[in-house]
Amino acid sequence: MKNLSTREVNKIFTSFNNLRVLIIGDVMIDSYLWGKVNRISPEAPVPVVSIVKKERRLGGAANVALNVQAMGATPILCSVIGVDKEGSRFLELLQKQKLSAKGILKSRSRITTVKTRVIGNNHQMIRVDEEIDYDITQAETEQFLHLISYLLKHERIDVIIFEDYDKGLITPPLIQRVVSEAKKLGVPTVVDPKRKHFGDYKGVTLFKPNLKELRDGLKTEFDQSNIKEIQKAVETLRSKMKIEVALITLSEHGIYISSKKTKKIIPAHIRNIADVSGAGDTVVSVASLCLALKLRPEWIALISNLAGGLVCEKVGVVPIDKEQLREETIELVTKKKE
């Protein structure tokens, strides 16, 4: 792997500030109930959590927007919310975080997704989901596509992210139209997939599944501890779907990157793991920014791998700390040169 100098790393992180990112995906509110556990319920063998703090955060594709924003770039979030109290709260959270709502469509046929996590003694005890996961209507798809086309035409977009949570916003017609339009404009496309539409993202620039999503999406079995079998599955994926770069997250084993010229595992770094929630959002955010800057595949993998590990040290879904990531990247570069 070609070394980067400290000066080059600093230039990359400064260049992030000039990027504009269109994020298409399912949004939600991440609701947290923080408390203490001192006893077991007499009603059932479950812990009793005494709530001391309540918190609402932007989640789903909105967390990707927060990570993009935290890296200094400008996110433009495109999604659908309900015409309900939680939808109003979602817009309030956007405004509080100084994120644009120009790409948000309201639907009277849907509710705004809310995921409530109960945290006892800094450990997640249970999660409760309120959501609708059937596809948006054909009329809503056309309206949403019109909105995306308008933004692509009137905003300078450097990269497009599909953040798919299988909640019904992203459909095959939407994928095909956006990918086609992006190719005409020369804008790279990045996907964080789920199983339902895994095979519909043909021709995208960068595809980022984890191992389970890779296995389920290809409908094949392979030994997840055998790198040769993983490599074979990834090459099948790239060939079948005509993908330029595949970035496979390997959990505690790091990241595997595959492109025409590069096939490499970037190992994970030793961390005090507190919570893996949102790590995938961080990885795809940072990888997309690196792709927009046309960095070499191995550096895309290295920086996004570091980013995913850093957020796992925090409890709950939180965006990346850009300065900490920059410092760790420089430290890793320095070690490689020694």
Image: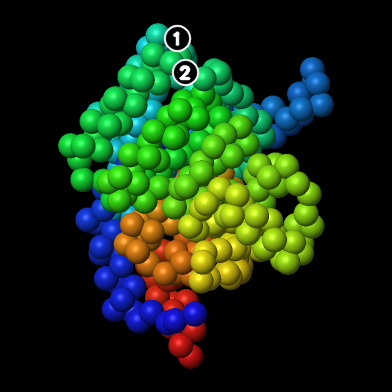
> In this orientation, which residue lies closer to the viewer: 214 or 239?
239
Q: Position of residue 314 (x, y in %)?
A: 52, 51
Q: Position of residue 118 (x, y in %)?
A: 60, 31
Please name the residue that numbered disc 2 is placed on.
136
The crowd level at tag 2 (other Cα within 10 Å; few <14, some 14-19, many 20+) is: some
Q: Which mark is residue 34?
A: none
Q: Where is 100 relative to 158, above or below? A: above
Contact, CB < 8 Å: mark 1 with mark 2? yes
Residue displayed at 39% across by 16% down: 140
Q: Dot 1, how many residues are within 10 Å of its Cα: few (below 14), some (14-19), or many (20+)?
A: few
Label 1: which residue?
109
Q: Residue at x 50, y 30 (%)?
A: 172
Amino acid residing under circle 1:
Ser
Earlier in the chain: of badge 1 and badge 2, it is 1
Give percent across and percent down for residue 178: 37, 36
One can see residue 33 in this view = no
The mark tally for this picture is: 2
Disc 2 residue type? Ile
**Residue furthest left as drawn:** 154
